[in-house]
Amino acid sequence: MAKDHIMFVGAHCGDVELAAGAIAHKYAKAGHKVTFLHLTAGEKGNPPHTSVKEYKNQKIRESKAAASILGVHTMTLDYKDAELFVDDETVSRVATIFRKEKPNLVITHWTKSMHPDHAACPKIVEGAWLKAALPGFELDGLPPHGIRQVFHSENWEDTEYEPDIYVDVTEEFETYLKAISEYWFVMNASSFRYYDYYKALGTTRGCLNRTTYAQTLKYRIGSNVRKGAHIPGFPISQ
Ligand SMILES: [Zn+2]
């Protein structure tokens, strides 16, 4: 069976790891290529006595350590934390990465988030998805690339997120917890109890999935629609 390339696109180092790191690990373990693309380091939640510049380097180091535990590739772009915009330059840059890396599935933030960078990220992905696929766009001489599917994953800052897909990550959850522990903010931020929240979330999603742990995804708005001659799964003649 052909292996997939799944690319997780997050606003800050740490976002996609928290939201779907166990799903990423599950696919990486099975031999699929998995890449984390962080648009910014997320450097402005810097700890006391650490400058924004130092924290940026620290977060990139932490992202590499987490990626190594999960068995995935990682890259961080140099956009600034809390200054992520849906503009032509950013969309073209991500579209160029899509053409170079050729992911066939992209997983990114949910569209409704109280964090402006998180809300901008799926809009950048949508724009880049279109640009990467359209032959009329010239991007570094790279051939067009079509991504088969885009899903959203679950961050605590999301609003109106109701999961569509539950993925059993029971076997991967211990490694996931180890990977997210590489991040200082996950273990030490005074603003939010990241580790406790995501461990509990994986547990409650697992309860609903009838597995020990689970992480969830969501279809794009309007994309979970099936058109045809009969109700999906219930053909007229059997
Ligand atoms: Zn974030």
Image (cartoon, grey):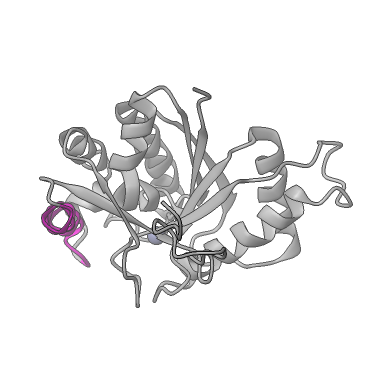
- Image location (x, y in percent) of residue 104: 58, 40
- Quadrant in which residue 193 is drawn: bottom left
Q: Is residue 36 left or right of residue 24?
A: right
Which residue is located at x 36 percent, y 38 percent?
A: 24
Q: Is residue 73 left or right of residue 77?
A: left
Secondary structure, magenta segment, majority class: helix
Q: Is residue 99 above or below residue 198?
A: above
Residue nearer the viewer, 118 or 149 = 149
Q: Is residue 124 above or below residue 94?
A: below
Residue 90 appears in the figure: no
Q: Is residue 143 left or right of residue 162?
A: right
Q: Is residue 195 magenta?
A: yes
Residue nearer the viewer, 199 or 135 = 135
Which residue is located at x 37 percent, y 53 percent?
A: 15
- Image location (x, y in percent) of residue 195: 17, 52
Residue nearer the viewer, 14 or 7 = 7
Q: What segment carries the magenta color?
A: 191-209
Taking the image in four quarters, ligand 1 sits in the one at bottom left
